[in-house]
Image (tube, rainbow, N blue to C red):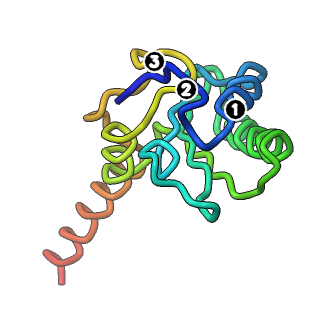
Amino acid sequence: MEEIDEADSLAVDTDAIIEVLDDAPVTAAVLYGSHARGDATADSDVDLAVVFDDSLGSVETTRARLGLIERLTARLGTDDIDVVPLARTHATLRREIYDDGIVLYGSPDALPAMDDPSPAADQMAAFDELLTEIERVV
């Protein structure tokens, strides 16, 4: 994963994103997808993975995420923005974020480890166990 060193090198206004993040309960943010890879087109959305402050509960995290999308939409002049909590991403998306992403805000040290299981992965593992048990009984 890269750290941003020159905001003008990207098609998206990273300075504006950073200004919005300064007022959000976020400890780190990673730009990923086409804007990070440098192959964005006029139709490309802005993909941002964020690490929310640990003190936020589930409802507060959802509110913070929606507020962040609203402020980014106003600041960037587009509603084609995806903000995902990094800790809740599935392994495939997390791998893409870690491989191609550019840290815009915070430190790479603030990001969860690549091998930290996401809640979705935990839920899938529990579901797989349940299916195995059902198959055993049936």
Pointer 3 or 2: first along the chain: 2
Q: Secondary structure at mark 1?
A: helix
The reply to whether discs 3 and 1 touch (Cβ–Cβ < 8 Å) is no
The residue under label 2 is 104
| Quadrant assignment, res 106 | top right
Type of amino acid under label 2: Leu
Type of amino acid under label 3: Ala
**Is 108 situated above or below 100?**
above
**Is 112 situated above or below 126?**
above
Task: Please give the name of the residue rendered at 28% of the width and 65% of the height, measured from the top-left corner.
Answer: 130
Where residue 39 sits: x, y (%)?
46, 53
Question: Viewed as shown, does residue 32 lie left or right of 128?
Answer: right
The residue under label 1 is 17
Task: Please give the name of the residue rendered at 45% of the width and 18% of the height, measured from the top-left corner.
Answer: 110
Q: Crowding at label 1, few (<14), some or many (≥20) Cα neighbours within 10 Å?
A: many
How far apart marks 3 and 2 lie (CA) works out to: 12 Å
Q: Secondary structure at mark 3?
A: helix
Pointer 2 or 1: first along the chain: 1
Where residue 118 sits: x, y (%)?
38, 42
The residue under label 3 is 110
Q: Nearer the viewer, residue 117 or 93?
A: 93
How far apart marks 3 and 1 lie (CA) works out to: 18 Å
Type of amino acid under label 1: Ile
Q: Crowding at label 2, few (<14), some or many (≥20) Cα neighbours within 10 Å?
A: many
Where residue 131 sits: x, y (%)?
25, 71
Task: Please give the name of the residue rendered at 70% of the width and 58% of the height, measured from the top-left corner.
Answer: 80
